Amino acid sequence: MTELISITDRRRLADEDADLRRALHRFVEGRLRDRGDSEDLVQETYLRLYDYRRTRTVADVGAFCFAIARNLIHDHLRYLRVRPVAAELPDDIACPAPRADEILAYRERVDLLTRALRGMPPLRREVFLRRRLDGQPSAQIAADLGLGLSAVEKHVVRALADLRQALGRRALGLGDGA
């Protein structure tokens, strides 16, 4: 029978401890408005309680825990007021690689531009690729393809218009370098 009482007492103590922990969480979180910091302060409250109880007795554990928690809240808020404001990081620390969302946007643009290039008339595509991607002079393209200089420039302008239109349908910009 004494073992049954001991199990019952253990359950009661566990329930009381769980109730105290919930009450401490509400108390601390209500003052800090930060769940992570609240959890840390409740853990620190229990650590200080157990350290204190190793050498002394505590008559009212609940009142003692709330007093510890209140002091920890004051210390935490004081720390937040006096801590130095984080300095802005220099640019050389930042990662130079593009973010994942930028990579996806670039890939989408490349896919759209590739489809638009494939949909162009072959001569316009050839002139555009030679002029804008290969960097060939207009005079060389005109001589190679038997066109006039103005025809080469018109093909380039129309190809750019086609590419802008393809990107515009998807509300994507071509950028300043086009």
Image (cartoon, grey):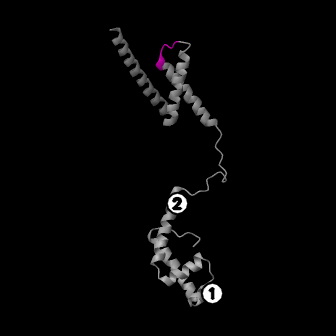
First in sequence: mark 2 vs mark 1: 2
Task: In the rendered structure, find residue 82 and report the number of the disc placed on it.
Answer: none
SS of the residue at dot 1?
helix
Image location of residue 34, percent across then percent down: 50, 37
Task: Residue at 52% x, 20% y: name it.
Answer: 49
Q: What residue type is labelled 1?
A: Ala
Classify 160 as above or below 170. Answer: below
Q: Indicate whether 122 appears above or below 90.
A: below
The disc labelled 2 sits on which kind of residue?
Ile
Say what secondary structure mark 2 lies in.
Answer: helix
Quadrant location of the C terminus in the rendered image: bottom right
Circle 1 sits on which residue? Answer: 139
Q: Nearer the viewer, residue 136 or 62?
A: 136
* Residue under the point 59% across and 80% down: 131
Residue 17 relative to residue 87: left or right: left
Residue 2: horizontal and vertical position, in percent? 35, 8
Residue position marked by numbered label 2 in the rendering: 103
Residue 149 visible in the snapshot = no
39 left or right of 9? right
Q: In this view, does 152 lie above or below 63?
A: below
Q: Residue 70 appears at what percent x and percent y?
A: 53, 26
Q: Residues within 10 Å of mark 1 (few under 14, many from 20)?
A: few
Which span is picked out in magenta? Answer: 57-62
Residue situated in front as seen by the camera: 49 or 108:
108
- In the rendered image, residue 17, in percent from the top left (x then y), is placed at 43, 22
Q: Does the magenta stretch include residue 60?
A: yes
Residue 25 against residue 171 in the figure, above or below: above
* Image-based side of 89 in relation to 45, left or right: right
User: How far is disc 2 from disc 1 in space, using C-alphas?
Assistant: 36 Å
